[in-house]
Image: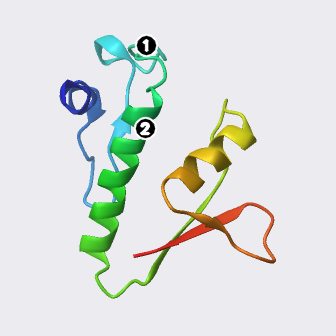
């Protein structure tokens, strides 16, 4: 959970109500010197993804499916598709890269 605390320290406060926090470099500058956390292992990725699914279903209780694509920058598409299938997602027929899971 320390990951989230570190990220919060790097978020720039909202300038106005319509603005969104901006991830800044270390030392409060705009230089991209963010901490190098490396990639999460598969267990960590699955845990984070399942937490996001819980948030989505809590935020949108009437939803019947979750849709996502298989794109993850810097990752192999086959690996991403296997990851999604391992979490119960299936390729949506007629689409190129979209996967869905019933909730």
Dividing the image into 4 quarters, which one contains the N terminus? top left
Q: Residue furthest bottom?
A: 62
| Residue 85 screen position, x and y as percent | 59, 55
Q: Is residue 43 above or below residue 86?
A: above
Q: Badge 1: how crowded within 10 Å, few (<14), some, or many (20+)?
A: few
Where disc 1 sits, the SS reads loop
The label number, if any, that marks residue 45 in the structure image:
2
- Which residue is pictured at 31% across the width and 72% down the height? 57
- Which residue is pictured at 26% across the width and 27% down the height? 3
| Residue 99 screen position, x and y as percent | 63, 65
Disc 1 designates what residue? 36
Q: How many numbered dots are placed on residues in this image?
A: 2
Left or right position of 103 against 69: left
Marks 2 and 1, the one that precedes in the sequence: 1
Q: Quadrant of residue 103?
A: bottom left
Q: Nearer the viewer, residue 29 or 3?
A: 3
- Which residue is pictured at 30% across the width and 18% down the height? 28
Q: Is residue 28 above or below residue 86?
A: above
Is residue 19 at all visible to an observer of this figure? no
């Amino acid at each position: 959970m320390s990951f989230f605390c570190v990220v919060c320290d790097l978020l720039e406060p909202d300038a106005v109500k319509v603005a969104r926090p901006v991830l800044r470099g270390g030392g409060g500058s705009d230089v991209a010197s963010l901490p190098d956390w490396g990639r999460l292992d598969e267990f960590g990725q699955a845990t984070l993804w399942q937490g996001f699914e819980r948030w989505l279903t809590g935020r949108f209780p009437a939803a019947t499916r979750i849709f996502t694509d298989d794109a993850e920058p810097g990752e192999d598409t086959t690996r991403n598709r296997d990851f999604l299938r391992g979490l119960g997602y299936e390729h949506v027929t007629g689409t190129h890269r979209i996967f869905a899971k019933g909730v």
